[in-house]
Image (cartoon, helix red, strand yellow):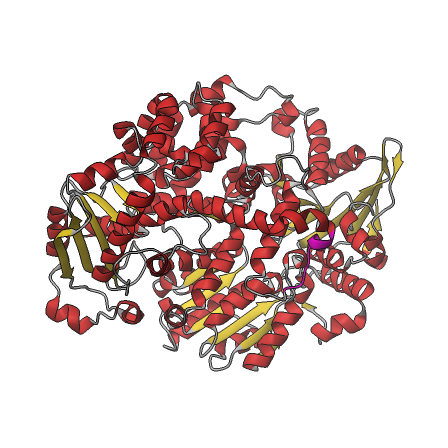
Amino acid sequence: MNLNAEQQQVVHELSESILLNAPAGTGKTRVLAARVANIIAQKKAEGSEILCLTFTNRACKELKNRIIDTVPEEGFAVTVKTIHSFCYSLIKEETKRQSDRYHDFLIYDDEDCKQLIASIDLTRTTPRPALQELQTFIEFEKKKRVIPGLRDFTNIQDDLKGWLTDYGEDLVWEYDIALAENHAIDFTDLITGAYEFLQDDAICRRWREKFRFISVDEMQDTSEVEYTVISHLFPGRNILLCGDYFQTIYEWRGSYPQYIWQEFRNDYQPLEVTFTINYRATQLLLEASQSFLFRTLGKVTVQSIYTEPGISASKDRGAPIILHKAGTVFEEARWIFREVKALPPEERLKTCILVRDNRQAKLIWMGITSHNQKYPQDQQLPVTCIDQFHLFKRQECKDVLAYLRLVLNKHDNLSLKRIVQRFVPRIGRRTLDTIESDSYRKVGLMLSDFIDPLSHHTGDPYGLLLTALAEERLVVFDVESTGTDTTQDEIIQIAAIRLDAKGQPIDKFNTYVKSGRAVGTSYYVHHISDEKLATEGIPPKEALTKFLAFAKDAVIVGHNVTYDLSILQSELQRLGISESADFPYYDTLDIYRRFYPTLLNHKLETLSRLFPSGHKPTHDAFDDILATAGLLIHAINEKIRPTETARRAAMAIYLPLFAPFSRKMDALRRLSYQARPTKIITSVMKDNGVKAWYQTHRDTSDRANYIDRLENIRKLYRIAKETDDSGQNPRDALTEFLKMTALSNSELDSMLAKDPKIPIITIHQAKGLEFDYVFMASLEDHVFPTYWARQKGDIEEEKRLFYVAMTRAKKRLYLSWHQGFGRQSYLPSRFLKGVNWDYCEIR
């Protein structure tokens, strides 16, 4: 591998931490992969001891592929994740330890969260701000839990001061309760939740000891809150932070690289390296982009970061930048259309059209489409707009995903409501409003109870619980394991008790289980050593078979029991045991959240202090089930039995309406234990009426705006098929697919790979991409910089964004703007003055 001297320094320096400043196009990803290969070759660490974090899924995929290409075997073991994905993994694994977050949680995206906020009725009559403003406020307030003195980068407290003074605290409180009721978390919870876990010394030590080398890419886009979280892993590790200050384009979400870099310098005294050789752009384009920085940000500012000017590795001087002024946006689109058509046919798909925002993307797309339609189909330009890349956020795909989420999480009331309103007949808004009213909540009812087979069997969601207690079929159980990854870790202790009709133990099961994995740092939680397992444990197949016999025909109860059932089911399949752990179950975490929603938290330890449980949990499985049993009986006596009559009466009114849909969802859920995600999607489409509904409700808009919703669902199906890991059991694979759809901001790469087109996208979407030909369109001063940037009097980030757009081009750059629309006249963007016209040609 040919590396320049600066790159070799980063690859071969493995004893000191490094702060790397890597401008666009300087080969950073290639160097990161080479460094991982060298770490492994020098036996400084195994692949599993290397963590690489980056900002986008696109960068993540590219780096992972590069690593695997460089070190094929060990490369698969290297952890390469986005920061949000890493935090997801941490929370998912640690829910067992903390027991206040549901193990089966789902991630709600922005649209889901807005729907949830809209459902919170704090004021009844008082007008309230827009959902986006409320969502921004909630995000900021949650981040203050990590950094109390966090800069108010949103200025939202000034904008909404009056309303938020009266209702803000209640809003955040009710919003968190609503998330918990749905067994869901939002994107901010991924970061703040990971932070909360890492405050626990044992958890922090366990995660820190997993990795010896950590690299964090795109540091300029990492927020203070995110850095505060991941820096918990740094002490005693070898750290590489890399980024480019002049590509900071997420300051609006809390990215302050100068603060992060200075803190890193103070804490770790890193070796500082700057890459200067550019492998992407022509000489002219590199000089032009550097000149733009000098002219807009100032020579002193630029040279404080880039101590040496960049050098192009290309021998090609390059073609000049093209400048074009059009009369209207449609004339500008026509000019772009003609310029692209003038390129050699084999070069056209190496083109990208960049705009500042979604509205401009739509206008340019409409303009180009109108010109396209004048040509025969085989002569049209294959262009596609930004909307097409948000596949997972499209109505039809979110409908299908709602079914999948409900399959995994029966408490996802938001998904259920979405499905019911479109696909379930005879259930209207008034019915839903009644079921979600305070009177129903007070007796412990949620919308999801109306599709629970247990409710339809007994007329009460808690009917089976009460019956099983009376028949002495309640089994409270808990497990301890080598770790908290249900797909890989192994059970080392199973404890269970069977209760009599009064809630007293009448039989018990408690066994240690031999394991093929070392307990590692999990020892500090459960204090079960490898030696103890070797002498007192029995073979796992024997242990699990005996437990299934003990729990035969039982109703299972546990605290955050979905974790225990998940790892039990996973290990049964790994051991080749055909019996299933698909028990009917109740979760004391869910019960106490329903009947006592305003408690500070619902951890087993907290509940045992607040309510008479008779036992103290200790993280020994047997102690924990005794505490859980005590809490269960208290809830039954104080809440569940006293409200039974009212609950049955409420259920009787609407339960029959939900019966057909309940049967369909139960069939889907059972199928999910045996079939791959694609088969679940097929069943959703064919057996649940989604395909028929969209065939009946076809898009009837004009051709330019036509949406083929069924084709979008087919694309979703294809992505599910391509990403399916056959080595995972079906439920784990479905969970992984839903995680991917929730954490993905755009499907740009995969969609262009399958169906190459010329994308019309925002500059933010183009971050990390490169194209031979780049058109920067709609460069009007009211568009770029944005209205909000001008209002705040701070356009520095807008300057950097313009620079990022310029650096996407490899061969040629086109800059265009239009003079007006209707009676309105527009000025060209002030940033065009920052472009040295010595590098330009006017057309």
The C terminus - image quarter? top right
Figure check: 9 above or below 24:
below
Task: Please report the bounds of the magenta region as a residue range.
Answer: 150-158
Main SS of the magenta part reads loop
Whether residue 180 appears in magenta in the rendering, the answer is no
Residue 748: where, in percent of width, then height? 55, 44
Report if residue 154 lies within the magenta region: yes
- Which residue is drawn at the image coordinates 71% and 76% (left, top)? 307
| Residue sitting nearer the eye, 555 or 94 | 555
- Please give the count of numbered marks on the rendered protein: 0
Rendered location of residue 592, percent (x, y): 37, 48
Q: Is residue 797 visible?
A: yes
Which residue is at a point 48% across and 33% down the rendered structure image?
437
Query: Vertically, is 615 above or below 130?
Result: below
Name the residue located 76 percent from the left edge and 71 percent from the top edge. Answer: 301
Q: Position of residue 54 (x, y in %)?
A: 52, 61
Q: Position of residue 67 (x, y in %)?
A: 44, 63
With 631 as the anchor, is 383 left or right in this view?
A: right
Res 107 visible: no
Side (left or right) of 486 relative to 69: left
Query: Which quadrant of the structure image shows residue 650?
Result: top left
424 vs 614, left or right, is right
